[in-house]
Image (cartoon, rainbow, N blue to C red):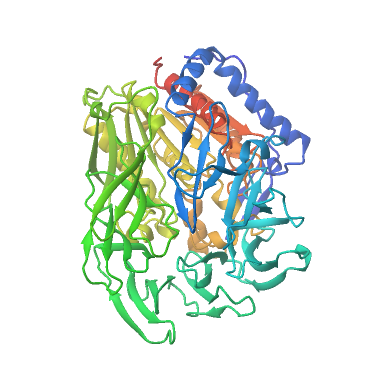
Amino acid sequence: MATKDPQPPHAIPRPLTRTVHGLLLSDEYAWLEDRDNPETLAYLEAENGYAEALLAEHAPLREQLYHELRGRIKEQDRSVPVRRGPYFYYQRNEADHEHALFCRQWAPDGPEELLLDLNALAANHAYCQLGPCAPSPDHGLLAYGLDTTGAKIYTLAIKDLQSGALLPEQIPNVAWNIAWGEDGRSLYYTTFDQAHRAYRLYRHTLGHDPAEDELLYEEADERFSLTLRKTRSGAFLLLNLFSFDCSEVRYKPADDPAAPFVVFDQRQPQVQYQLEHQGDNFLIVSNAEAENFCVRIAAVADPSQRCVLLPHRPDVLIDGVDAFANHLVVYERRAGLQQLRISAPDGTNVRYVRFPESVYKFYPEGNFEYTSDSVRFVYSSLVTPRSVIDYELQKGRWQLRKRDEIPSGYDPARYVAERIEASAPDGALVPMSLVRRRETPQDGTAPALLVGYGAYGMSYDPGFNPHWISLLDRGFVCAIAHVRGGQELGRAWYEAGRLTNKKNSFSDFIACAEHLIEHGYTSAARLAISGTSAGGLLVSAVVNMRPDLFRAVIARVPFTNVISAMLNPELPLTIGEYEQWGDPAVAEQFHAMRDYSSYDQISAQAYPHILATAGLYDLQVPYWDPAKWVARLRARKTDSNMLLLRTNMQAGHSGASGRFAILEELAFEYAFLLEALGGGA
């Protein structure tokens, strides 16, 4: 185990107090929220230096892990081409290059046309990530957004694909979505407000100064954000206005720049819906009088005329639909597993895709062609690498287009995946998905990594993680806890893990850990946990509640300062998050949040080994959130276990942007994990 030297840095406490609902709150590290303060940057750098120094003796292990992780990447590779109009678009990677090349061909065997070289675009930046990207309807232009800080704020450029030149206009502060009008001269985009909320929709006309772009819509309600997309049919542009509790869709013909956006259904409290277009109809996926959503049809000519196509089912959650000219694809969940339902547009001739394993994950990808007779999805499982599948909708035939190679070698027969359940204190059965080597003993001696998320209704599906092989081959059991707050078991599973019900997420996770120990998968002395963002809240909260249950914690960009964040409406995204965590103006919700807020519940007790990560330009979980959490832990904890903070000073919420730089961060995490659990070269 590492020695006590070097000595850890200590942030100077400077108490800042206020009273909320009769409760005196003190935040002695609020000064760390000032990124422009030289003391703040000095503290972050000191923590980085301490983390490096403490694990310096494990540099050979980090190097070994890095090469293991890199050995599972096919460095020179090419994605399966995606049909978009007359072209096949794809990306490829070259050996030793951090970033991808984006290319296209006229035909699968035609000459390559290089569209974007992200390596060249990243040449003068420590961070570089491609954001929204779309060819014009005639495929002569390419609009794309670039983020060079990690804040996920994009500068939009337009490239002439014949000459290779950039058009003079560039548009800053662009959000995630862009869409071309069918005229090929109108480009629609959304922008952020100061709280990093997509709130305005603009139309840009080629050749015009972006400063003169027409503002088409501004969302005044700070709970709501905007997304924009074009229907697969190409007929309509859809503007989606959404909060965590309700939504509203506005639509307009994509071929008429002058046409206004029309409200489809006015927003109503607790009602969420999505819109799709197919033939003469709109498809509406809605939870109006349908907790797990249903699908309704409305005539384009008269949207008030509606009927139910797929009714609500209490045991099946509808995640969404994809509409093709001759087929309807519905994405569902039943008993915690994803399903793919295929039918004719009128809902007849129903069949389900049969998946080859009992524990798996899939998601649709690259389905741009409205007249296609196949749907593409990416399939994997805890033992099967990422696989691109084209499923023929009429014939029901599964075609494997590509399975990721593991150049250093991988035999899936050596591993076994399981789905088990843990019993929560209130009797709820919490699913867990886990993977291990076949010979890994189930006698309590194996090390284990338990991960989870449990927020926003986002399901943590059991897909392939090539990085886990480094742990599995060292005898680890790796498990996913599908706790409440996610949506694996339907909408009720989500509602039971948010607002004043949030503590169910934590008790579910603790129950999963206890189940792994009770059934011999691991022991408390060999159990590590990890979570990212809201998953970082999950692991940081349970470690306050049951520090004896875990040996190590990796909290990636963890949301630990729930009270501090919710009490500051000027922070990015805070007001919209009231519907997820609670509004501190409501006493019941405030006290419920404070009862689990990781930063506020730190006490003088022994904690496991802890590694927290942060990104200096993170606007989703500000760097100071994990920094303050670590500073207070360092001042109050009673043990001598490792407590490390690593801040990426050149990135945001997602960490490094390069495919190899990411592995360096992961190698550090795994070296920490192996050291905390007792070594393992």
Residue closer to the observer: 25 or 229? 229
Residue drawn at 34 percent across, 36 percent down: 385
Q: State which quadrant residue 360 falls in.
A: top left
Q: Can residue 487 be seen in this view?
A: yes
Q: In which quarter of the image is the C terminus?
A: top left
Residue closer to the observer: 75 or 634? 75
- List the single residue furthest toward the front: 110
Q: State which quadrant residue 222 falls in.
A: bottom right
Residue drawn at 60 percent across, 17 percent down: 53
Please indicate whether residue 42 sits to the left or right of residue 377 in the image: right
The total of numbered circles placed on residues is 0
The x and y percentages for residue 264 are 49, 79
Residue drawn at 63 percent across, 36 percent down: 119
The x and y percentages for residue 13 are 68, 36
Please indicate whether residue 397 sits to the left or right of residue 323 in the image: left
Q: State which quadrant residue 624 falls in.
A: top right
Residue closer to the observer: 427 or 140? 140
Please indicate whether residue 477 sits to the left or right of residue 1 in the image: left
Residue closer to the observer: 132 or 335? 132
Q: Is residue 654 visible?
A: no
* Relative height, residue 459 to residue 55 (above, below): below
The x and y percentages for residue 451 are 39, 38
* Relative height, residue 534 to residue 185 (above, below): above
The x and y percentages for residue 209 are 78, 64
